[in-house]
Image: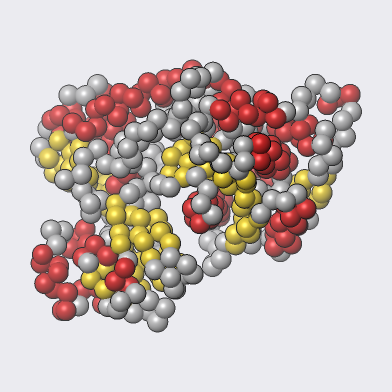
């Protein structure tokens, strides 16, 4: 059961210095630019970290004529979670902060629940930030979270980019994810609440040993070196961004084409990173493939024979020119309803939907998507059937096919306004990794560097 706690400022805690408004403002300054009256969304669980962030961000925004909206996710994984979400919303109301409770609906997986909950939370927060018109989504990850993340990635064989930890700034289509507390100790956040007399909720899931992060937290995680790795990652990503346009292109169907000889002339480290980034972009993945599998494909590409491999949910096929296709498996089903909205499907396609209840599925899972009245459209569309099977289609509330956005086909007027574009969550070339705001590495420049997201080249 959740417990509401209040921090007692005893002698042992006296060295935990609260985060004041001026310090928080300097942290926010490294993420410029902002609009004239910034509107911020804050992921708020009710825990000490996110509560401190909501308090500090609310003051920061109000001082600039802006405002914050709190996004409260109810995962529905415990019977107490709806009541806890309501109590967090009540806390917000008492402080004049608008709150939106986001419920993770539908069946929950029996395995991989930790990853599934994280993915669901990210999706709910991102969609809500866009719905509220917030260009900046603030998350309360701190130094302890960063250390745990690096330790978990090391245990999974992560490469040099992953071991740099979480980025302090991530660009998403329509908004940015900001982590202004990323290098602060948790004690400073609880001290921030204590000096203001604020309470918070202690989430029992943080101590639930069924979850890997909770087990690691219980065992204790040593501080992880970040600054050197972060500087190295920034340098590598700069070289990667300069190299990719000359070796790979991705078309509007999400199909990649790799010039194998040009790729082989890249420095080995950059060539390896290029393969990882291509797999993320075409496969719609947030994270790169495992190092051992990545090394296997790199070795195959450096050899003389034809390539026929699978990596990162992608098929890699060819000799001098290697084609990279999304696999026809593990393609999602996404439910959407209500007002017009844009949905990220399979981490690859942004699908604009009109008001109403719709379901996005893979074309290959809907028998009606290959009916005779669309054969002419299919003949005109320069896309193989294997690729078409991995594209999104729109299914109406009665279960019938409503639209195939990539072919410009729709069954009725409403579905005719559906549009789809390839805009992966992890583009080939995009804004660079952002080190923690207190590292000094971002002084004088913004991590939101203005480089266009999307493919390196789009024919």
Q: Quadrant of the N terminus?
A: bottom right
Number of numbered discs overlaid on the protein picture? 0
Position above or below: 272 against 84: above
- Residue 328 location (% of width, % of height): 28, 59
**Which residue is at the front of the view, 32 or 325?**
32
Q: Residue at x 49, y 69 (%)?
A: 338
**Residue 419, picture quadrant:** bottom left
Q: Residue at x 77, y 45 (%)?
A: 200
Q: Residue at x 62, y 50 (%)?
A: 69
- Residue 453 location (% of width, % of height): 33, 40
Q: Residue furthest bottom?
A: 398
**Residue 61, picture quadrant:** top right
Q: Relative to residue 212, is residue 56 drawn left or right? A: right
**Residue 101 visible in the shown view:** yes
**Residue 84 visible in the shown view:** no
- Residue 83 location (% of width, % of height): 74, 62
**Which residue is at the front of the view, 195 or 237?**
195
Position above or below: 96 against 145: below
- Residue 298 location (% of width, % of height): 25, 33
Q: Residue at x 87, y 30 (%)?
A: 9
């Amino acid at each position: 059961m959740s417990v509401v706690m209040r921090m007692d400022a005893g002698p042992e805690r006296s060295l935990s210095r609260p985060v004041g408004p001026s310090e928080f403002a300097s942290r926010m300054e490294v993420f410029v630019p902002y609009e004239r009256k910034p509107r911020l969304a804050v992921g708020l669980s009710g825990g000490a970290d996110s509560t401190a962030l909501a308090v500090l961000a609310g003051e920061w925004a109000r001082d600039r004529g802006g405002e914050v909206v709190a996004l409260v996710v109810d995962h529905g994984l415990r019977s107490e979670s709806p009541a806890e979400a309501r109590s967090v919303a009540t806390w917000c109301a008492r402080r004049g902060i608008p709150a939106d409770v986001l419920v993770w609906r539908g069946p929950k997986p029996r395995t991989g629940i930790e990853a599934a909950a994280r993915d669901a939370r990210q999706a709910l927060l991102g969609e809500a930030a866009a719905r509220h018109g917030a260009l900046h989504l603030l998350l309360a990850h701190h130094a302890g979270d960063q250390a745990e993340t690096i330790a978990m990635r090391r245990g999974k064989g992560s490469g040099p980019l992953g071991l740099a930890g979480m980025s302090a700034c991530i660009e998403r289509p329509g908004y940015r994810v900001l982590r202004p507390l990323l290098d602060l100790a948790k004690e400073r956040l609880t001290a921030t609440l204590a000096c203001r007399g604020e309470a918070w909720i202690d989430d029992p899931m943080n101590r639930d040993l069924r979850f890997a992060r909770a087990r690691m937290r219980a065992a204790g995680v040593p501080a992880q070196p970040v600054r050197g790795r972060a500087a190295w990652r920034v340098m590598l990503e700069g070289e990667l961004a300069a190299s990719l346009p000359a070796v790979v292109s991705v078309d509007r169907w999400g199909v990649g084409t790799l010039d194998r000889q040009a790729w082989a002339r890249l420095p080995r480290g950059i060539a390896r990173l290029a393969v990882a980034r291509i797999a993320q972009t075409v496969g719609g993945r947030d994270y790169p493939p495992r190092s051992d599998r990545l090394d296997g494909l790199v070795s195959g590409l450096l050899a003389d024979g034809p390539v026929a491999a699978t990596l990162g949910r992608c098929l890699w096929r060819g000799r001098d020119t290697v084609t990279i296709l999304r696999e026809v498996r593990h393609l999602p089903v996404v439910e959407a309803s209500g007002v017009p909205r844009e949905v990220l499907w399979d981490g690859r396609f942004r699908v604009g939907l009109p008001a109403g209840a719709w379901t996005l599925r893979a074309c290959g899972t809907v028998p009606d998507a290959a009916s005779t009245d669309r054969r002419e459209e299919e003949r005109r569309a320069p896309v193989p059937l294997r690729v078409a099977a991995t594209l999104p289609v729109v299914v109406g509330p009665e279960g019938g096919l409503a639209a195939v956005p990539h072919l410009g086909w729709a069954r009725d007027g409403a579905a005719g306004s559906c549009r789809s574009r390839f805009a992966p969550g992890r583009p080939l070339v995009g804004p660079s990794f952002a080190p923690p705001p207190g590292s000094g590495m971002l002084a004088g420049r913004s991590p939101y560097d203005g480089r266009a997201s999307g493919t390196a080249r789009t024919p």
